[in-house]
Image (cartoon, rainbow, N blue to C red):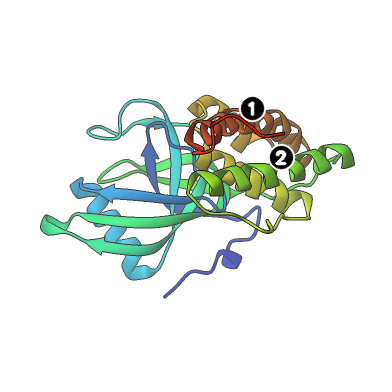
Amino acid sequence: MAINPDDFPPGTTTELSLFPLNNVVLFPGMPLPLHIFEERYKAMIGDCVQREEPFGVLLIKEGNEVGEAASPHSVGTTARIAQVQRLEEGRMNILTRGEQRFELLETVRTVPHLVGLVRYIEDDEGTVSTTTVAGVREQYVQLQRYLTAIAGGWDREVSVPEEPIALASGSAAALAVSLPLPPDVRQDLLETPTAGEQLEKLLTLMRQANRIVAEQVEQNSPFKGARLN
């Protein structure tokens, strides 16, 4: 039976299979491809596929992905499996997409894989600055155009989320995909409680990202000869 995200409104507590990862912070709306090869995770993902259930992704604070159970951060995001490529010996390539933020309240078990009691986090708009929203929207459009240019395309028009919560979530996902931000910076952004506070942090980060990506666009440009003015 498929589980709809709406079955778990904010504040709901439930048990969730967890996948701690090194250097990976998943945001709602962000795509995340994974190669599944460990026996415990082959079984866990197999169950999630069969039941059409999500699992939770958490950044590892101490320990490793392989071997004994790692100690993760307490705030993560559920991942919904969108595609599965089955390989030899039960291995899989899967494509997932982030859905809901959650807080890990306690560990239920660690064998064969980590399972936790989690509480789904409510999206809170908080205090939102119209100037910050306008700035993030501008930087979001620029970032998407730069990324399209790097990929060899051209965007005539970029669709930008209007609501602060959707704008914060979409911008965080776009930033995480396009720029190798340090894991602690990403985790701090994920844990930021309100959209207003996230947007303030995102404005600074997206300006930095656009400067970096603009340099990449310039380096890749075939039009570097003398200009005719």
| Mark carried by residue 190 | none
Q: Residue furthest left?
A: 89
Q: Residues within 10 Å of mark 1 (few under 14, many from 20)?
A: some
In whole angstroms, how far apart are the C-alphas of marks 1 and 2?
A: 10 Å
Q: Residue furthest front?
A: 228
From the top left corner, tell me how far across and down residue 26 is, in percent.
50, 43
Q: Which residue is mark 1?
A: 208
Residue type for callout 2: Gln
Res 75 seen here = no
Relative to 60, 225 lies left or right: right
Given residues 132 and 185, the one toward you in this image is 132
Disc number for residue 139: 2
Crowd tier of the residue under label 2, counting other residues whose Cα lies within 10 Å: few below 14, some 14–19, many 20 or above: many
User: Which residue is at 58% across, 67% downward?
Assistant: 7
Above or below: residue 156 compared with residue 108? below
- Above or below, comparing residue 23 to residue 28 in the picture: above
Apparent side of residue 113 relative to residue 175 in the rendered image (left or right): left
Q: Is residue 81 visible?
A: yes
Residue sitting at 68 percent across and 30 percent down?
207
**Kind of residue indicated by mark 1:** Gln
Residue 83 location (% of width, % of height)? 36, 64
Q: Could you say whether the residue bearing mark 2 is in a helix, strand or loop?
A: helix
In this rendering, is residue 60 above or below 14?
Answer: above
